[in-house]
């Protein structure tokens, strides 16, 4: 019987080891894909805005800063996160990168929320108080203030983060990060880790960070976007239009509303789990051995970084600029398309009779009857609807819609 028990215990240990290895490999693969897509998406977003002069506006300037925050997060956070949480290996990148990778996480998270708050303020002013909307000079000052706040929030972590060497017993009492879910399984007697050594100020630092990084921006974004959503939902269709045009206006309005709610909802859904786990762990409401819980919530936050540039694809003008930008990334494909189009037949001779017909038609100009005048009024109203919808999401010119 004793031998059977030993065999069963050995089998259970092998199963646990295999499960841990499977979890580690899966977490590495998923995190790598999210980081890669986040890097490519935000990089393409910045390049499109930099290349297109039509997108050099206040809103896109703020969104570019948001994309820069995401790029810094993707570049500096993976070494810290993978080494500390997924692999649980010794820190091997030095003290400088230890401080940089830990503090930049808070710089980018804080900057992302504050730049989205500035976008909400700009959109709200553009619709309700257009006279006071942000110009480039005000936007530049607010951008500097947002970055100063971001670095101010992260400064305690830059000061307290260091390479720390400790034994197995000290590992359970050590807090690697304010949201850290420690695990003391399968570690050596001595480890060197990138850690925040501030146990006496841990809870105060936790609450201060969440209020400055999360609560204040949400207090700005939620009322602004809620007011815009109610306005778009209740705003009646102006002018005399056909039933089809009324339905199109309602669809356009609902699409704008869904986009606005998705922007705010993605921030709340993707970042709330990480902040909630940090608070609950600080007050010992969560098991301190739940390392996997922190890995899951961090991946959800990284997924929010991937989603950020995707929302602006809903804007027609930005989609057109991306289509114009893609041939520069794939020049061989664009050259093949040009060669294939050059081999087509010459339609210049066929188009000449049509040009003559069009010149004859210009001589016969129709008389503007009341019915045609009513139709032209509805067309102008439809253009106004498109103009307003464009200014809700971005400052893309009317010609790009």
Image (spheres, rainbow, N blue to C red):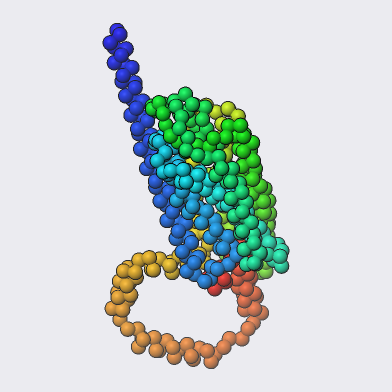
Rendering coords of residue 200 (x, y %): 61, 31
Q: Is residue 188 visible?
A: yes
Quick one: 81 or 365, which is closer to the camera?
81
Rendering coords of residue 312 (x, y %): 52, 59
- The image shows residue 17, relative to residue 310, as above or below, that is above
In percent of the image, x 50 and y 44: which residue is there?
99
Q: Is residue 300 visible?
A: no
Count of all numbered marks drawn on residues in the image: 0
In percent of the image, x 44 and y 88: which residue is there?
355
Q: Quadrant of the N terminus?
A: top left
Rendering coords of residue 187 (x, y %): 39, 28
Q: In which quadrant of the rendered view does residue 398 lie?
A: bottom right
Quick one: 107 or 354, which is closer to the camera?
107
Quick one: 72 or 151, which is closer to the camera?
151
Rendering coords of residue 120 (x, y %): 63, 56
- The image shows residue 216, relative to residue 254, as above or below, that is above
């Amino acid at each position: 019987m004793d031998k059977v028990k030993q065999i069963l215990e050995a089998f259970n240990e092998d199963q646990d080891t295999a499960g841990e290895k499977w979890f580690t490999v899966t977490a590495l693969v998923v995190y790598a894909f999210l980081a890669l897509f986040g890097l490519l998406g935000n990089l393409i977003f910045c390049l499109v805005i930099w290349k297109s002069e039509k997108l050099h506006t206040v809103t896109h300037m703020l969104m570019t800063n948001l994309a820069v925050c995401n790029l810094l997060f993707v570049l500096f956070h993976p070494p810290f996160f993978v080494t500390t949480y997924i692999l649980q290996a010794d820190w091997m990148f030095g003290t400088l990168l230890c401080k940089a990778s830990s503090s930049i996480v808070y710089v980018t998270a804080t900057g992302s929320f504050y730049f989205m708050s500035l976008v909400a303020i700009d959109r709200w002013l553009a619709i309700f108080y257009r006279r006071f909307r942000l110009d480039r000079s005000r936007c530049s000052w607010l951008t500097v203030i947002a970055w100063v706040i971001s670095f101010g929030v992260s400064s305690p972590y830059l000061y307290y983060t260091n390479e720390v060497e400790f034994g197995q017993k000290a590992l359970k009492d050590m807090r690697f990060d304010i949201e850290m879910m420690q695990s003391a399984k399968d570690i050596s007697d001595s480890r060197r880790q990138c850690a925040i050594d501030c146990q006496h100020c841990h809870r105060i630092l936790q609450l201060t960070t969440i209020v400055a990084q999360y609560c204040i921006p949400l207090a700005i974004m939620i009322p602004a976007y809620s007011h815009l959503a109610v306005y778009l939902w209740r705003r009646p269709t102006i002018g005399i239009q056909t039933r089809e045009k009324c339905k199109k206006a309602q669809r356009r309005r609902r699409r704008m509303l869904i986009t606005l709610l998705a922007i705010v909802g993605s921030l709340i859904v993707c970042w709330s789990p990480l902040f909630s786990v940090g608070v609950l762990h600080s007050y010992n409401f969560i098991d301190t051995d739940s390392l996997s819980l922190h890995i899951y919530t961090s991946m959800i936050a990284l997924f929010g970084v991937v989603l950020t540039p995707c929302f602006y694809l809903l804007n027609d003008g930005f989609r057109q600029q991306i289509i114009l930008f893609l041939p520069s990334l794939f020049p061989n494909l664009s050259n093949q398309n040009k060669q294939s189009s050059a081999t087509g037949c010459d339609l210049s001779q066929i188009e000449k009779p049509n040009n003559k017909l069009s010149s004859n038609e210009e001589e016969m100009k129709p008389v503007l009857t009341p019915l045609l005048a009513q139709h032209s009024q509805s067309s102008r109203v439809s253009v106004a609807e498109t103009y307003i919808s464009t200014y809700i999401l971005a400052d893309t010119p009317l010609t790009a819609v």
